[in-house]
């Protein structure tokens, strides 16, 4: 049997391509959903920390943020996933659980990334905004935060790539993601090489694509840095 | 061409420490509408700190600042509202690098609902034309020279229609050949009747444009008076030695 016949048998004749496609779709959904949650949580935590630093009455906010980051970063994401699926959200579908878990996990890393981005913006920017009469929050939203995001875009891209690959453990909680789909095909067809290589190739292409996309984005945002 | 004197800012007993180190040790100043006051002094004398206390970018540790009848150091005072009336120009320009020149100018007035977008843009363009930068409205700050940046920064503050302009060493970060263009704008502004407090090392500007010069040394006002008095007939030894070094 030639390689093409083998491919045909493993993926097409047995209808397994649908499984792979479904898994691909789930991986994308989980990654994008988690990324969104991660960026929001990360930004909220970073900004909350920025505002609470050195303000005695806001000490509690600072403590909550620190505990969140410490706890989440200290637990493997698979364990977190199992805890959410079997203890916190019992009865919920695997996909929402996965989105939330990966999002919460990513948020802890994102918080540090966003915070470093905010700290890298010159202090004069906040002062200039305040001197025009903006509140701290207005100056943050309109002046500091957009610049912070630009600073950390490469780091967010890295986090996105890490997140995409991390979602491959979603199979632990009955989600058929790309990895699980490939493994199921392997199991059903007794063909290990082709399904697993395909899965690996798809991840690789996604990561390369993301990297490219990010470069384009960065160039667009760097427009204002260019001189005549 | 001042008519009846109208008090704009009254500073009494202003004190500021940084980590226990005293920087300002009881400053008393009265600023009338239309005054152009230059603050001079050796580095570390507290000039910039004094200026930054006026709009509460630094929180004073003691004393009072009354601006247009309101006590700024009072916790109940809405500082943001008062800051709209106090334009500030920084040594390092602090333009917003992610916005075009026009967006830099209209961002605050529109956000704070002082003007509609159209009004703000019209006003910004008029002011830009006055400082000779109308053709740079669509540029980004990084495409401008230092002198152009600082002129834009002055216009940005003016777009809020402030009652007083605070200048924190506006020409210190500029290449020498660009100092003139910024001082010209400031001079024109002073002639238009704007109240100005200028921390500067430009003694020529202080002598020519200001109506009062304050010499700060070690956190206190060591001497003050008209430019003629301060530059022509310095009383204290400290001022004499300072002037001998900078003139």
Image: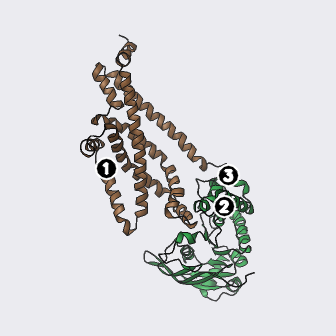
Chain colours: A brown, B green
Secondary-structure class at tag 1: helix
Q: Position of residue A35 (x, y in %)?
A: 41, 43
Mark 1, Cα crowd under 10 Å, few <14 / some 14-19 / many 20+, is some
**In which quadrant of the rendered image does the N terminus of chain A lie?**
top left
Calculate the distance from the C-alpha at mark 2 to the C-alpha at mark 1: 46 Å
Which residue in the protein does label 1 denote? A72
The answer to whether marks 2 and 1 sit on the same chain is no
Task: Give the image location of residue B215, x and y in percent.
Answer: 61, 81
* Disc number placed over residue B138 in the picture, else none: 3
Examine the rendering and report whether any part of residue B25 can be seen: no
Q: Is residue B119 above or below residue A40?
A: below
Determine the CA span between mark 1 and mark 3: 45 Å
The chain to which mark 1 is attached is A
Q: Which mark is residue B152?
A: 2
Residue under the image location 40 percent in, 46 percent down: A37
Task: List x then y, in percent, for residue A111.
Answer: 40, 52
Q: Is residue B167 above or below residue A122?
A: below
- At mark 2, the secondary structure is helix
Label 3 vs 2, first from the N-terminus: 3
B236 or B8, nearer to the observer: B8
Left or right of B202 on screen, residue A76: left
What subunit carries mark 2?
B
The residue carrying pointer 3 sits among few (fewer than 14), some (14 to 19) or many (20 or more) residues within 10 Å by Cα, namely few
User: In the rendered structure, the residue with mark 3 lies on which chain?
Assistant: B
Q: Position of residue B190 (x, y in %)?
A: 71, 74
Q: Residue furthest top?
A: A1
Q: In the displayed image of the protein, which residue is found farthest to the left?
A: A87
Measure the alpha-carbon separation of dots 3 and 2. 12 Å
Residue A201 in view (yes/no): yes
Residues packed near mark 2 inside 10 Å, few (<14), some (14 to 19) or many (20 plus): many
Q: Residue at x 57, y 44 (%)?
A: A220
Is there CB contact under 8 Å for labels 1 and 3?
A: no
């Amino acid at each position: 049997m030639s390689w093409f016949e083998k491919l045909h048998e493993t993926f097409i004749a047995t209808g397994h391509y649908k499984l792979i496609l479904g898994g691909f779709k789930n991986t994308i959904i989980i990654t994008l959903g988690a990324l969104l949650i991660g960026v929001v949580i990360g930004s909220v935590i970073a900004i909350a920390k920025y505002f609470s630093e050195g303000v005695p009455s806001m000490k509690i906010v600072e403590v909550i943020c620190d505990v969140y980051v410490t706890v989440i970063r200290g637990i493997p994401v698979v364990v977190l996933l199992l805890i959410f699926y079997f203890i916190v959200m019992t009865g919920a579908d695997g996909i929402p659980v996965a989105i939330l878990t990966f999002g919460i996990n990513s948020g802890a890393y994102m918080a540090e990334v966003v915070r470093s981005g905010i700290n890298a913006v010159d202090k004069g920017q906040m002062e200039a905004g305040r001197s025009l009469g903006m509140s701290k929050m207005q100056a943050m939203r309109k002046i500091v935060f957009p610049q912070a995001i630009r600073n950390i875009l490469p780091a967010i891209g890295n986090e996105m790539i890490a997140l995409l690959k991390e979602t491959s453990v979603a199979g632990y909680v009955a989600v058929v993601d790309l990895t699980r789909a490939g493994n199921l095909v392997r199991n059903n067809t007794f063909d290990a090489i082709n399904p697993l290589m395909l899965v690996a190739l798809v991840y690789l292409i996604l990561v390369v694509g993301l990297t490219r996309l990010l470069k384009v984005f960065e160039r667009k945002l760097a427009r204002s840095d260019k001189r005549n | 061409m001042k008519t009846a004197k109208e008090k704009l800012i009254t500073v009494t007993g202003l004190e500021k420490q940084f980590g226990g180190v005293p920087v300002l040790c009881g400053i008393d100043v009265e600023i009338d509408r239309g005054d152009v006051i230059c603050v001079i002094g050796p580095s570390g004398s507290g000039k910039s700190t004094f200026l930054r206390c006026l709009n509460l970018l630094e929180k004073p540790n003691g004393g009072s600042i009354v601006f247009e009848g309101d006590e700024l150091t009072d916790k109940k005072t809405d500082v943001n509202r008062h800051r709209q009336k106090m334009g500030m120009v920084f040594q390092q320009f602090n333009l917003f690098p992610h916005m075009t020149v026009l967006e830099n100018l209209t961002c605050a007035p529109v956000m704070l609902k002082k003007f509609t977008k159209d009004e703000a843009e019209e006003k910004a363009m008029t002011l830009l034309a006055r400082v000779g930068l109308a053709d740079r409205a669509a540029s980004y700050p990084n495409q401008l020279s230092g002198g152009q940046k600082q002129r834009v920064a002055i216009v940005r503050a003016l777009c809020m229609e402030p009652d007083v302009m605070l200048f924190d060493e506006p020409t210190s970060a500029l290449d020498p050949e660009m100092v003139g263009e910024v001082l010209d704008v400031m001079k024109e502004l002073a002639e238009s009747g704007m109240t100005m407090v200028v921390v500067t090392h430009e003694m020529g500007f202080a002598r020519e444009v200001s109506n009062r010069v304050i010499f700060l040394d070690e956190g206190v006002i060591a001497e003050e008076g008209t430019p003629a008095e301060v530059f022509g007939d310095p009383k204290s030894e400290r001022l004499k030695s300072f002037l001998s070094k900078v003139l």
